[in-house]
Image (tube, rainbow, N blue to C red):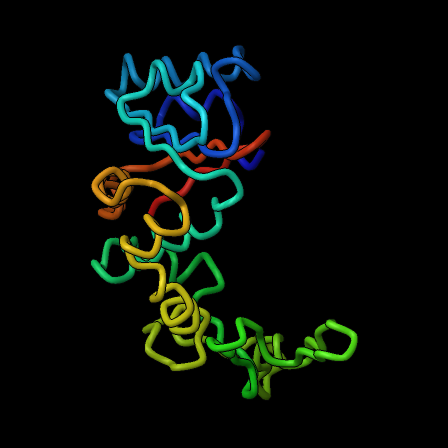
């Protein structure tokens, strides 16, 4: 929990994924109901099952069990590709502007990151760290243009998760997936917020 449950009432979009809040957390779910009633918030549910949460949602998207990460990388790819992110927020209050050490990379053919040892199937993570400047602080690029910034590395990594790829991996119909992305992207203007209720916790973001 990063915010209080009561803060959910202020959100504009709610995404429930990896849980069934209406049934598992009925007291907390009250604030989703408050957001829908008083704030005209839209409730999205992404789940393999049509749950009690899905039954009161504005939009339900089925997904194959165990494919949540691919689905969310598809969402990230959509938001970055369509420039539907709250740039001021992510550049100044997340690590996307941080520059990663030289040598970090991802082998698309093998599906492994730099530092992988095939003999014992472990990683040496020395290249996974941020680059440190002469002042002892992490090197940053708030323009998000540096090729080794977290933003650019994430953009490159997520680029393979097209709507077609998400549909193939996750079993989520392309049109439903894109509708979810559109609703999430409506909060990209910095004037709206979105709450993600994932598993037993939730976080609030402005995309």
In the depicted view, which residue is nearer to us: 36 or 2?
A: 36
To which quarter of the image does residue 25 belong? top right
Q: Is residue 121 left or right of residue 7?
A: right
Quarter of the rendering containing residue 64: top left
Name the residue at 20% across, 58% down: 82
Q: Is residue 189 above or below residue 54?
A: below
Q: Residue at x 27, y 53 (%)?
A: 163
Q: Which residue is nearer to you in this view: 77 or 84?
A: 77
Residue 138: x percent and y percent?
A: 56, 75
Look at the image and tell me in which quarter the N terminus lies: top right
Left or right: residue 179 compared with residue 55: left
Instruction: Tell me how many marks there are.
Output: 0
Closer to us: 49 or 143: 49
Residue 59 on image: x %, y % = 28, 26
Q: How far from the left and from the top, in percent, is residue 178?
A: 23, 44
Q: Is residue 53 above or below residue 126?
A: above
The residue most toward the right is 120
Location of residue 159 in the rendering, given as x and y in whole percent from the top left corner: 34, 66
Considering only vertical position in the picture, is 185 above or below 159?
above
| Residue drawn at 48 percent across, 72 percent down | 98
């Amino acid at each position: 929990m990063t915010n209080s449950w009561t803060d959910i009432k202020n959100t504009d979009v709610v995404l429930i994924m990896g849980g069934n809040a209406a049934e598992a957390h009925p007291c907390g779910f009250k604030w989703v109901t408050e957001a829908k009633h008083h704030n005209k918030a839209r409730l999205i549910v992404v789940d393999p099952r049509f749950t009690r949460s899905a039954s009161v949602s504005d939009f339900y998207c089925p997904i194959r069990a165990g494919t949540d990460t691919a689905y969310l990388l598809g969402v990230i790819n959509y938001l970055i590709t369509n420039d539907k992110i709250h740039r001021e927020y992510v550049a100044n209050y997340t690590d996307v502007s941080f520059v990663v050490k030289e040598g970090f990379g991802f082998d698309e053919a093998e599906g492994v990151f730099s530092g992988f040892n095939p003999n014992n199937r472990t990683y040496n993570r020395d290249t996974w760290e941020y680059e440190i400047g002469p002042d002892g602080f992490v090197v940053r690029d708030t323009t998000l243009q540096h090729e080794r910034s977290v933003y650019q590395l994430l953009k490159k990594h997520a680029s393979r998760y097209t709507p077609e790829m998400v549909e193939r991996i996750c079993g989520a119909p392309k049109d439903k997936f894109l509708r979810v992305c559109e609703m999430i992207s409506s909060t990209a203007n910095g004037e709206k917020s979105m709450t993600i209720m994932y598993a037993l916790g939730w976080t609030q973001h402005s995309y």
